[in-house]
Amino acid sequence: MKIAVTSTGKTLESAIDPRFGRAPYILIIESEDGELLEAIDNAANSGAFRGAGIQAAKAVADRKVGVLLTGHCGPNAFSALEAAGVKVGTEQKGTALDAIERFKKNEIVFAAKPNAEAHW
Amino acid sequence: MKELAIISGKGGTGKTSLAACFAFLAESLVLADCDVDAADLHILTQPRIIHQEPFVGGKKALIAPDKCSQCGICLENCRYGAIKEVFEVDPVACEGCALCHYLCPESAITMEETLNGTWYISETRMGPMVHANLIPGEENSGKLVALVRNQAKVIAEERNIDMVIVDGAPGVGCPVISSITGVDHVVIVTEPTMSGLHDMKRAAELVRGFGTPISLVINKWDIHPGMAMEIEEYGKSSDIPLAGKIPYDRLVTDSMVRRRAVVEEDPGPASEAIVEVWKVINQHICK
Amino acid sequence: MIVAVASGKGGTGKTTVATSLALALGSRSQILDCDVEEPNCHILLKPEITDSYPVNLPVPSVDKEKCSLCGKCGEVCQFSAIVLIGQTVLTFPELCHGCGACSILCPERAIQEVPRRLGVIEMGFVKDVEFVQGRIRIGEAMSPPLIREVKTRINRDKVAILDAPPGASCPVITTVKNSDFVIMVTEPTPFGLNDLEIAVEAIEDLGIPMGVVINRCDIGDSDSKDYCARKGLPLLMEIPNHRKIAEGYARGVPLVESMPEYVDKFRNMSDYILNNKH
């Protein structure tokens, strides 16, 4: 299954960016072998005026991702991810590698609701 | 880290003067001036700008006259009346929806980024401050407010400061909503007038929608003690605790003229009351 | 004639000036409260409301039967108010600006527009003065469409007085646009002057003539007056920081009623504006 992790950089060793819509990169990782498939440059989106979370959710869903690991996820992005069947693990810290490890060990508690406010 | 927002519903109730006083009284804090349409806090804090960035990103339509065949499709479909009869875009009316761009059969309309304002990180005698100027008449003030608040939080984290004080915008619309979403506590500053009461009720209704705890401050209460009492009663009956009442005091304006917060000067009735109000609010937040 | 009353800073007495001007002109005037976030004219005027109607914004509703999941709607929407995600088209009505792009550009004609409540327009009379106000729904962020609706009620045969929101951002510009004259109300303090400068800069771009009313003229400093002189802005009126005025306002009594000698001052101001309008 494909996993998306919000990141401050382009590699698996980069620190997780707690923001979803406005993270500089979104890493797409194959959970089976931990391979980094793509580092989505989210710069255009992170500077977007409105609906950054919704656009990031679309980018993730379009790549047929099953799980998103991030810090905070607002209500609009959350409902978009939910509609696409993407499960969301929030409050993630450390690097993308750490998050993947936690996922493999079944340590991720998936969010049932958004954990951030909508921004204007 | 705690975030405290000061709002008023009605303008001119003393919100910014009070924010400057709280900033002076708080041990350490980051100030965020989110009243970006009419930012005044800088007048009292006299910031020294250490970093500034343009605020761009809003888009507006632009018609290339050499490609335009004046077919009128854009004019017919624009709901904002932003296309003039001479096939020019009125940038004030344009909302940047891009409908005209997509409909134009000649591909004569492009969407161009516009400069909406500038934001700053500064040092002040009270602590670091994030503030901004919106270019007059530009939209997206809610977005700029979110940006200012986020920057203030980043600085607070970097420097291990545990409080952010937000000077919010007046009204109950987009910029205010942006000023208060997710903060830990909201102070509503009002004055003892019928408009003050009316606007305070609307502001309180908005804050309650977010479930954020509120403290009420009645400024210049002795201008009309009867109305102050009515506001106090309303607070009691609606579960909005009163943090205190501040008397009318010319020293507030006098110190503003000297570019100082009134609590920085020789004590007077207003500054003494403000010190007490701050103690109450500070206790609420630290709970 | 359309006269907008604006003020960069809130609480400077904008509503006091707008309502007193309307009352002084009586049946010749119409007052329209465009400060839809915090409409206050009604507090001073106590109008008899005779008519009201809701104002809506058209937002998209997708017919799943007709939708081919092409994603065009999400591509064209500049506000992320509609998006194709997975096998669903989601809408976010609170982000929608009601431009109609998704509906008009949908190749399957699968998007209808349905109303989202923005607020309400209320109309009535204060004695012989026509009264109109807009009131935004709490929690609603989009005020300009509601302000535009208030302005459709302008009676061209009268002196239409628009009470603008404070500040200098889009709701203010939406209000003062196409006015013949703007009265800027300020107070002579550093805050008042700073906000006056911002608002004057915004309105200058529209090319509408302006004049200034200085309220509480005996507090603060003289910098505001110097600014007006430098800018060539006519000083229309000065109102002192009188306890009687403040108390009247607190109780909801208009200035021309607590101080009747102001009726003539407001009439003179109106005459001046009539001779110097756009």
Image (cartoon, rainbow, N blue to C red):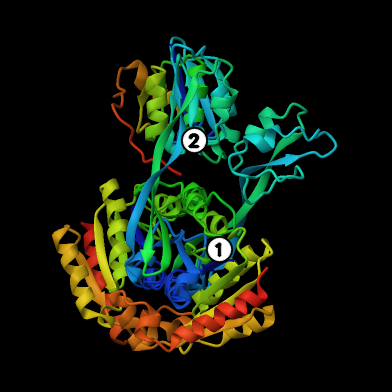
Location of residue C56 in the rendering, given as x and y in whole percent from the top left corner: 42, 40
Using the image as rendered, state which of residue B255 and residue C14 is in the foreground.
Answer: C14
Instruction: Check disc 1 and report its element: helix, strand or loop.
Output: loop
Query: Label 1 is placed on what type of residue?
Result: Asp
Looking at the image, which residue is at 52% across and 23% down?
A59
- Which quadrant of the rendered structure holds the N terminus of chain C? bottom right
Q: Determine the residue located farthest toward the left in the rendered image.
A: B237
Q: x, y percentage for residue C257?
A: 36, 82
Tag in front: 2 or 1: 1
Amino acid identity at mark 2: Gly
- Residue C157: which numbered mark, if any? 1
Chain for numbered disc 2: A
Asked whether C206 or B21 is in front, the reply is: C206
Q: Is the C terminus of chain C in the top left, top right, bottom left or bottom right quadrant?
A: bottom right
Residue visible at 59% across and 37% down? B97
In-image side of C220 versus C78 (left or right): left
Left-right relation of C179 to B181 = right
Q: Residue under circle 2?
A: A51
The quadrant where residue C224 appears: bottom right
| Residue B28 appears in the picture as rendered | no
Residue C168: image location, x then y, percent: 55, 62
Disc number for residue C94: none
Q: Residue at x 18, y 64 (%)?
A: B234
**Label 2: which secondary element:** loop
**Is residue B209 left or right of C123 when viewed as pictured?**
left
Give residue A103's position: percent from left, percent from top: 36, 19
Q: Residues within 10 Å of mark 2 (few under 14, many from 20)?
A: many
Subunit bearing disc 1: C
Above-or-below relation of B239 to B83: below
Please tell me how crowded label 1 is: few (under 14), some (14-19), or many (20+) other residues with Cα within 10 Å.
few
